[in-house]
Image: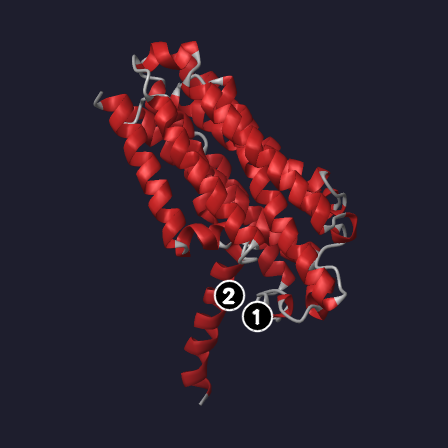
Amino acid sequence: MKATNTPSLHENRLHAMMRLLRPQQWIKNLFVFGPVIFGGALFNGEALLAGLATFFSFSFAASSIYCFNDIHDLTDDIRHPEKCHRPIASGVVTVRQAYGLMVLMFVLSMLVSLLPVQLRAAEVPSSGYWSTCSVAAVILFYWLLNLAYCARLKQFAIIDVCIVAFGFVLRILSGGVSSGVMLSKWIVLMTFLLTLFLSFAKRRDDVLRMNETGEAPRKNTIRYNTTFINQAITITAAVTLVCYIMYTVSPEVLERFNTEYLYLTSILVLIGLLRYIQLTVVDKKSGDPTKILLHDHFTQAVVVAWGASFAIIIYCL
């Protein structure tokens, strides 16, 4: 009996370790390809490979942070009706094993961040060296900032969502540095505002849950309410759309792509924002943006239509 149960135990532990690393959340790191897409370098092989290396570097760093988060929140997770099933809280993965995974993922992240230098050093050695140092420094800063977020900063309302949004800005900055694509200031602002919008929408789900159960899912949830969240969502959505429009009509973009039709894609951006607001306010399904992107067909259709129209305008017209 012991011999037959051992493989199952190992399989459960390996599965639990994968759940601890949250690979399904790696989709967030696709933001590193933003500079390649918006910079018109989609068919540049070296830029794509550099972006791919940065993607995996950020993904490993994020998994390391998820390990630390579950270790730090262990006491609270054990008492939580849902989070008690997390790998560490349920006892399937030990704290020691979680620390080992955390260190392993961070080391892998730093090693992978060195790959872009091999791709660009052949052209300009000094450029490749400094770009690699910059990418590694950005990811290290992202890692340290999020450790502080997990340990303390996530307890403060507004600061918590700003740190989450800033993490996505760091993603596109590192993607731009590694691929050698200059970023428009409007793209940087739009990235921060869009992810701030998504973060506020996610906090709205926490507020609704607190109103229903009487218990705050997060320590800072009591510093939010539906009125504040609704106004914050409206403001960030509106400013995000304005930033995108300003990007599409900015002189540098018109000169780079030699087209005046990018502003037409603003319609799809507006539709996408309205759909997400509908999911947030009407359907009350804003708890996990990743799940929405993976399961909501309307959102998927809008994203595909936007990507196709953007690519056609900058590469074909």
Q: Which mark is residue 92?
A: 1
Q: With respect to residue 147, does 179 lie above or below?
A: above
| Image coordinates for residue 275, horizontal then vertical, percent | 46, 47
* Disc 1 + disc 2, Cβ < 8 Å: yes
* Residue 259 in which image quadrant: top left
In this rendering, the count of numbered labels is 2
Q: Residue at x 53, y 30 (%)?
A: 240
Left or right, residue 99 beside residue 39? right
**Does dot 2 land on a helix, a strand or a loop?**
helix
Which one is nearer the viewer's eye here, 71 or 297?
297
* Residue 310 in which image quadrant: top left
- Amino acid on which disc 2 is placed: Ala
- Distance between the Cα atoms at labels 1 and 2? 7 Å
Left or right, residue 25 beside residue 234? left
Residue 240 in view: yes
| Image coordinates for residue 179, horizontal then vertical, percent | 38, 23
Q: Which mark is residue 16?
A: 2
Q: Residue at x 50, y 61 (%)?
A: 19
- Amino acid on which disc 1 is placed: Val
Chain-order first, disc 1 or disc 2: 2
**Does dot 1 land on a helix, a strand or a loop?**
loop
Quadrant where the C terminus is found in the figure: top left
Which one is nearer the viewer's eye here, 310 or 245?
245
| Image coordinates for residue 86, horizontal then vertical, percent | 59, 65
Q: With respect to residue 5, does 18 lie above or below?
A: above
Q: Residues within 10 Å of mark 1 (few under 14, many from 20)?
A: some
Left or right, residue 7 beside residue 202? left
Q: Residue at x 41, y 11 (%)?
A: 252
